[in-house]
Image (spheres, rainbow, N blue to C red):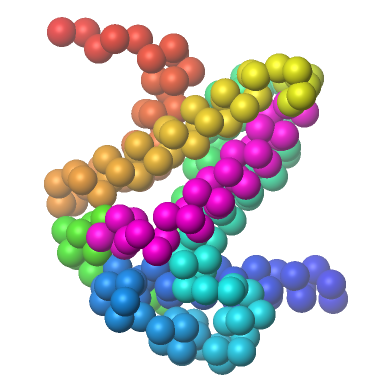
């Protein structure tokens, strides 16, 4: 029963986070209320407040939750798997559209991308985004330290890898938003970004 309850809570949180992103990208940050997000997710405003303190936190939660799941997935990868292979697989697991996405189909890519870019530039979101990134990178660094037998307090390696992985996903997402319609699949972009980092970021051949 506890497992079912936790899964339902995670599903509600995901639905609220996605509704916040979807509505904000569609209408603009200032034109979305907590009540709108709750209605789109099929819950009450009171339920929203049980999960988030603000719509900015709800928007940032999607990145945070996906990153925390990446760290958890990394811990489950085979011990003998190369680190960047394991990181790539762990990250890609989190980019499969869940039921909350399928319930609210996105508009055409160009319209959606423009809305998301505007949303990400919203000053009111920056604090929550920075907190989400810091929390996510710390958890990923801990998982990397466990996997590599390094010490977070004395070795920069796990934090460097976590920051590089976080940057790779961010750049892939930005490339996806900036690319032509239809864009390259996000999983392909993430794989390409991780592959280049794992190879040491060699200079492109001219």
User: Does the image show residue 176?
Assistant: yes
Relative side of 166 to 181, left or right: right
Relative side of 10 to 170, left or right: right
Image coords of residue 157 (percent x, y): 64, 18
* Quadrant where the N terminus is found in the figure: bottom right
Magenta-drawn stretch, dominant element (helix, strand or loop): helix
Relative side of 34 to 83, left or right: left
* Quadrant where the C terminus is found in the figure: top left
As drawn, 28 above or below 80: below
Residue at the far right in the pictured view:
1
Image coords of residue 173 (percent x, y): 35, 45
The total number of labels drawn is: 0
Relative side of 79 to 196, left or right: right
Which quarter of the figure has residue 90? top right
**Residue at 29 percent of width and 9 percent of height:** 203
Does residue 142 belong to the magenta stretch? yes
As drawn, 28 above or below 123: below
User: Does the image show residue 106?
Assistant: no
Image coords of residue 121 (percent x, y): 30, 55
**Residue at 48 percent of width and 18 percent of height:** 198
Does residue 126 belong to the magenta stretch? yes
> Which range of residues does the magenta coloring cover?
118-147
Which quarter of the figure has residue 6? bottom right
**Residue at 71 percent of width and 34 percent of height:** 143
**Residue at 43 percent of width and 73 percent of height:** 20
């Amino acid at each position: 029963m506890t497992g079912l309850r936790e899964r339902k809570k995670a599903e509600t949180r995901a639905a609220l986070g996605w509704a916040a992103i979807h509505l904000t990208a569609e209408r603009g940050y200032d034109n979305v209320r907590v009540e709108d997000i709750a209605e789109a997710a099929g819950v009450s405003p009171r339920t929203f407040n049980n999960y988030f303190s603000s719509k900015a936190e709800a928007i940032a939660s999607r990145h945070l939750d996906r990153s925390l799941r990446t760290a958890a997935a990394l811990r489950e990868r085979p011990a003998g798997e190369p680190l960047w292979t394991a990181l790539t697989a762990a990250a890609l697991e989190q980019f499969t559209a869940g039921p909350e996405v399928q319930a609210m189909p996105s508009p055409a890519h160009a319209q959606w991308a423009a809305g998301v870019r505007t949303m990400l530039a919203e000053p009111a979101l920056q604090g929550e985004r920075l907190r989400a990134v810091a929390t996510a990178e710390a958890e990923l660094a801990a998982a990397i330290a466990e996997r590599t037998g390094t010490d977070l307090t004395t070795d920069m390696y796990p934090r460097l890898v976590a920051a590089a992985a976080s940057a790779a996903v961010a750049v892939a997402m930005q490339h996806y938003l900036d690319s032509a319609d239809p864009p390259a699949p996000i999983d392909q972009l993430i794989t390409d970004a991780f592959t280049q980092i794992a190879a040491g970021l060699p200079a492109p051949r001219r």
